[in-house]
Amino acid sequence: IAGITQAPTSQILAAGRRMTLRCTQDMRHNAMYWYRQDLGLGLRLIHYSNTAGTTGKGEVPDGYSVSRANTDDFPLTLASAVPSQTSVYFCASSPGTSGADTQYFGPGTRLTVL
Amino acid sequence: GQNIDQPTEMTATEGAIVQINCTYQTSGFNGLFWYQQHAGEAPTFLSYNVLDGLEEKGRFSSFLSRSKGYSYLLLKELQMKDSASYLCAVTGNDYKLSFGAGTTVTVRA
């Protein structure tokens, strides 16, 4: 089935631990994104990649890093998790980067940092 | 920065009509999206407006006025399955989506 997959579905993590959230799409989309969603704040962009080999910072990049080695995969790493990173994380992709390109979202990863 | 406002919650009766308003102040404008998000699930695309006017898709319609920085999503003939959050998002000069906090719509029998 075409689309975006994320792993894990949920995770409980001790503060200070390193964690990588995985995201894979099979739609051959050029652009990929990572968002976090917190109650009352809506979706906020963490990092993005307009095409394989390039990445950029979004609205809330601190404490997170990404890489885009190929078209399909866009992992998000928390180098040393802190409780304020407790959130639901959504990966998304779009065919291009114009204002008209619709973003398609993965099912999300619910992360709790204790 | 980007500022996108929409009501937090709305309640309506099955079969009725609900209008969700969204106002925005952004650095440039390259389009406005509406997404639907059921509890515990991913957002899914509903509509896209870039020119002024009304776009109709079945029971859902979306309106845009660029001069007023205003949009609304109209849900007609409400069904129980329409209970969800509705997210307004705007693409600015950087071609990145900025989201409002979302409007939770509850449909009552």
Image: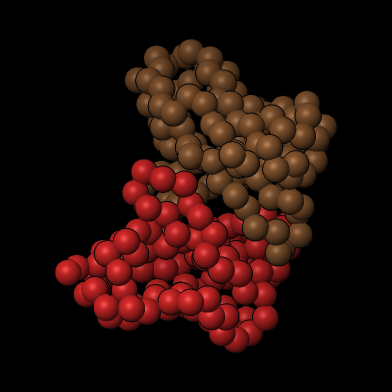
Chain colours: A brown, B red
Residue displayed at 63% across by 84% down: B52
> In the displayed structure, does residue B7 sit left or right of residue A109?
left
Q: Position of residue A47 (x, y in %)?
A: 65, 39
Residue displayed at 78% across by 29% down: A70
Residue A68's image quarter? top right
Q: Is residue B62 above or below residue A111?
A: below
Residue displayed at 72% across by 27% down: A67
Q: Is residue B66 above or below residue B40?
A: below
Q: Position of residue A4 (x, y in %)?
A: 59, 39
User: B1 or A74: which is nearer to us?
Assistant: A74
Return the residue found at the far right.
A53
Residue displayed at 32% across by 61% down: B81
Residue A10's image quarter? top left
> In the displayed structure, does residue A97 sit left or right of residue B1?
right
Q: Position of residue B109 (x, y in %)?
A: 17, 69
> In the displayed structure, does residue A114 sit left or right of residue B55?
left
Q: Is residue A102 in view?
A: yes
Quadrant of image for the N terminus of chain A: top right
User: A47 or A23: which is nearer to us?
Assistant: A23
Q: Is residue A80 above or below residue A25?
A: above
Q: Position of residue B55 (x, y in %)?
A: 57, 80
Quadrant of image for the C terminus of chain A: top left
